[in-house]
Image (tube, rainbow, N blue to C red):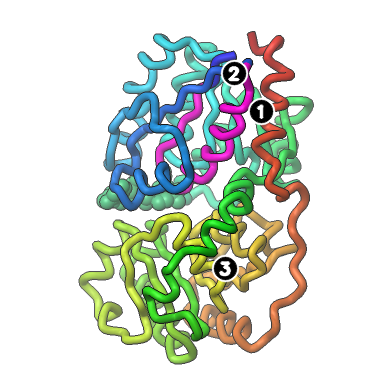
Amino acid sequence: MKVIVVAGTRPNFMKVAPLMWELARRPAVEPFLIHTGQHYDQRMSRLFFEELNIPSPDVDLGVGSGTHASQTAEVLKRIEPVLVDWKPDVVMVVGDVNSTLAAALAAVKLGIPVAHVEAGLRSFDRTMPEEINRILTDAISRFLFVSERSGVENLRREGISGEQVVLVGNVMIDTLLACRRRSEGSPILADLGLSSRPYAVLTLHRPANVENPNVFRGLMEAIERLGQALPIVFPVHPRTRAVLDGTRATSNHNLILTEPLGYLDFMKLLANARLVLTDSGGIQEETTVLGVACVTLRENTERPVTVEQGTNVLAGLEPKRIVAAGLDALERPLRQERIPELWDGQAAGRIVDVLTADSAHVL
Ligand code: UD1
């Protein structure tokens, strides 16, 4: 069975890692990895391949940055000949980025079944580019591998149900659990002078938060206020760097700015943080499993299990609410979180089991 796995951005790499490890263990499977090149820097891409033992991509499409349309179009155009040439039995895509949708669309138009890992998540906010990517990718996928039960229900409401929808757990958590021991060896806390001090971690990269000056200013005000309680480490995404450089936030002494961090350093930082503030999707899940308080700087989440069972609080974008949520989290002992169903480190194994058991149909 020939399986193509597609990855394009930083959050894709920790999702494809356990899939590649698992595929390599199955003698009946011939895997082939395509990197779309949506993310291309050492710190946004290559470092993750090295740290997570992901095999070098068989092909790098090198699409790079661009507008949504041009980035999506370039992946579509450049991936098609690879699919035609290699004739996979299935194309596996992960997450919700432009590369995910484009690869799925190219495959389905060639009559190649698509497997979507992390299917069914919905923020119900169609102004998010990721929400459009999720809805469209799910609509054209043959296999829908779901990470939390809300996803099964969302798909059912969209008329997608039956054997093709499988609750498998969370591949990102497979990676977290597999790398836990190694990440504990990271020197990042000592490097940042935080070995014996409580600190918070901040990440921000969503265009809706970063590119609207009023929203960004409000977020930074909230951060400045919380920074009076404890130092805040802020690994800065390239998009955010461009905005941040023009503001006075860079002179806030309680804000420790760093380059984007590698996986092992970042997991060490998260695991030991007193508080995490983020607009990322994946970090809401990772903090849930690590048992670390997370304040999400968004009005909605496509990962409701992290709020219902995990450590996540949705604070929105209003500075006062963010400060209140942050201070509240600092004052309270962590509430007893539960690890969501099947977030046990075995999701990739379940996925490959389904694909290989179903290969007779696929072929
Ligand atoms: C993309 C995903 C988002 C995901 C995020 C993780 C979509 C629609 N969005 O957003 O869901 O959470 O990745 O980072 O696919 N850049 C670099 N070096 C790189 C990559 C990007 O400097 O290696 C800069 C470029 O200036 C680029 C900007 O970052 O314009 C944004 O990159 P882009 O790929 O457009 O999307 P992200 O914001 O990273």
Q: Amino acid at mark 3?
A: Ala
Image: 300 above or below 172: below
Q: Amino acid at mark 1?
A: Val
Instruction: Answer whether residue 124 is visible to the viewer in this image.
Output: no
Residue found 74% across the figure and 55% down from its top: 340
User: Furthest-bottom residue in view?
Assistant: 228
Please state, as top left, top right, bottom left or bottom right, where the N terminus lies in the image. top right
Image: 156 above or below 279: above
Residue found 29% across the figure and 33% down from its top: 63
**Residue wearing tag 2:** 29
Q: Quadrant of residue 146?
A: top right
* Residues under numbered marks 2 and 1 in contact, where contact means CB atoms less than 8 Å apart: yes
Image: 244 above or below 121: below
Q: Amino acid at mark 2?
A: Val
- Find the magenta span and give its range: 4-27
Residue 32 in the figure: left or right of residue 285: left
What secondary structure is found at the residue carrying circle 2?
loop
**Residue wearing tag 3:** 271
**Residue wearing tag 1:** 352
**Dot 2: within a 10 Å radius of its alpha carbon, few (fewer than 14), some, or many (20 or more) residues?**
some
- Measured in 3D between alpha carbons, the distance from the residue under mark 2 to the one under mark 1, in whole angstroms, is 9 Å
Mark before the other along the chain sequence, 3 or 1: 3
